[in-house]
Amino acid sequence: MGIRYDNRRIRTNSTQASKEARKRRGLKKVRQYTTPRLPEISPEDYSSVITEQHEWTYGDRYYKLAAKYYGNSEMWWVIAWFNQAPTESHLVIGDTIEVPISIDQVLTIFYRGS
């Protein structure tokens, strides 16, 4: 399904609300990915990565930045993880984020910490 799902457990939601929703939809079960625990970035690793600063503006999205810098919009989570801002709603217009230039270097740091 993609590398961002590699370290996530799959579970079946068994709450009453979930059971009722599945029944209405004619489903026996729905598998869900658990919330991942992402590795932290050490100050040494953070400072070792070459980045480009980006000022957050109206209409910005992680997937658009990933497409621009990496040629792959599915790598949006790398920018989010590196900036410790999991979603765009964690940013406001005018915030400055760091976009890692070397995707290979950042993925090495990510998987070393996993």
Image (cartoon, rainbow, N blue to C red):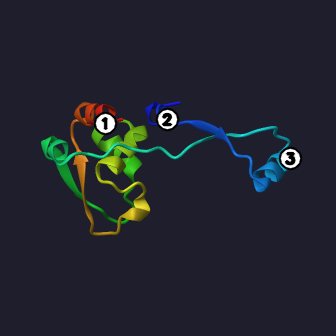
Q: Nearer the viewer, residue 59 or 101?
A: 101
Q: Which mark is residue 113?
A: 1
Q: Nearer the viewer, residue 24 or 93?
A: 24
Which amino acid, mark 2? Answer: Tyr
Return the disc, 3 or 2, that comes first in the chain's sequence.
2
Q: Which label lies toward us, 3 or 1?
A: 1
Q: Position of residue 112 (x, y in %)?
A: 29, 32
What residue would you read off at disc 2? 5
What residue would you read off at disc 3? 23
Q: In the image, is 3 to the left or to the right of 48? A: right
Which amino acid, mark 3? Answer: Lys
Residue drawn at the location 30% of the way across and 46% of the way down: 40
Q: Position of residue 99 (x, y in %)?
A: 25, 48
Which amino acid, mark 1? Answer: Gly
Q: Nearer the viewer, residue 43 or 64?
A: 43
On the image, which quarter does residue 59 sit in?
bottom left
Residue closest to the far bottom: 93
Residue drawn at the location 47% of the way across and 31% of the way down: 6
Q: Position of residue 26 (x, y in %)?
A: 86, 42
Task: Determine the secondary structure under disc 3.
Answer: helix
Return the disc, 1 or 2, that comes first in the chain's sequence.
2
Q: CA distance from mark 3 to mark 2?
A: 27 Å
